[in-house]
Each structure stands twice: as C-alpha cells, then as structure tokens.
Amino acid sequence: MKILVVEDEFLSRQILSDILSERGKVDAAADGLEAIELFDSAVRSGIPYDLVCLDIMIPGVDGQNVLSHFREIEWDNNIRGLTGAKIVMTTALSDYRNISKAFNSQCDAYLTKPIDPDKLEQTLKDIELL
C-alpha cells in the first residue's frame, strides 16, 4: 500500500508514519502545497496513493482545500469513484462544520486526535484497505 501522511507537527507526523509503515511505503508532507505536489506527482507517475491521512490545520493550503485539490487531480486524470485514494482526515477539529465539509468534499473517514492506533486500524478495515 502506498501512503501519504500530511501533518505539520513533526511528532504527530512521525507517530502516524511509524504506525502506518507496517502497512506499506509512507511518504510525508508538512504543509498543503507539498502534499498537493506529492499527490499530483504520484497520480501522474501511474502509482497513486492508496491512503492519505490528512490534517486540516496545516500551513499553506489548509487540509479542507487540499482534499478538494486531491479529488480534482483524480478527476482530471480519469480516476473516478471507488478507484481514488482513500482519504482519512486526521485532525483535532471535531465540530460539525469541519466534519460535514470534509465528507462533502469526499473524504472517506474522519478521525480526531490523538489518533488511537486501534481506531485507525478499524477505520482502515471500514474503508476496505485491510
């Protein structure tokens, strides 16, 4: 499985990357612009990400807008519906507005921090990555 972790806090990025490294190759981005570049490059290379864990409060382009960019990149490259990356929002924000916006922009799951490894594993099962 090819995985992208988008998280600006070094420790959170490292912990999530360590947990997910058991599942596949993990790339990491510390801001929204870097995430968009990595995602676009992966799609154009023909080896897109299977899973993206995406924080909302990141520098540059916030996670909500990054999510929209990811789905636009997929659309522009004829990646439709269930063939796209599974995107899990991993954030401290748990308000209805952010959750609703993320799902309206086609995230697959939403986890609030701190990320519990057992909940993450269950989420991966729920979105059919395990």
Image (cartoon, helix red, strand yellow):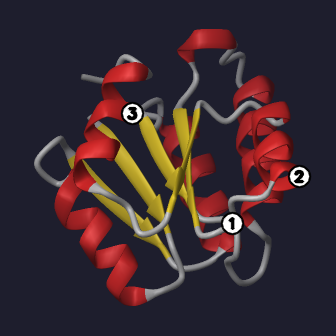
Q: Residue 93 bears which disc, if any?
A: 1
Q: Position of residue 74 (x, y in %)?
A: 70, 30
Q: Amino acid at mark 1?
A: Leu
Q: Quadrant of the C terminus?
A: top left
Classify residue 25 as left or right of residue 27.
Answer: left
User: Tag 1 or tag 3, which sits nearer the N-term?
Assistant: 1
The residue located at (54%, 82%) in the rendering is 8
Which residue was labeled with disc 3? 123
Farthest residue toward the left?
Answer: 22
Farthest residue toward the front?
Answer: 95
Q: Amino acid at mark 2?
A: Arg
Classify residue 95 as left or right of residue 2.
Answer: right
The residue located at (79%, 48%) in the rendering is 69
Which residue was labeled with disc 2? 97
The residue located at (62%, 77%) in the rendering is 31
User: Tag 3 or tag 2, which sits nearer the N-term?
Assistant: 2
Q: Amino acid at mark 3?
A: Thr
Instruction: Specify few, some or many for label 1: CA neighbours under 10 Å numbering under 14, 14-19, or 20 or more.
Output: some
Q: What is the secondary structure assignment of the residue under circle 2?
A: helix
Q: Position of residue 68 (x, y in %)?
A: 81, 45
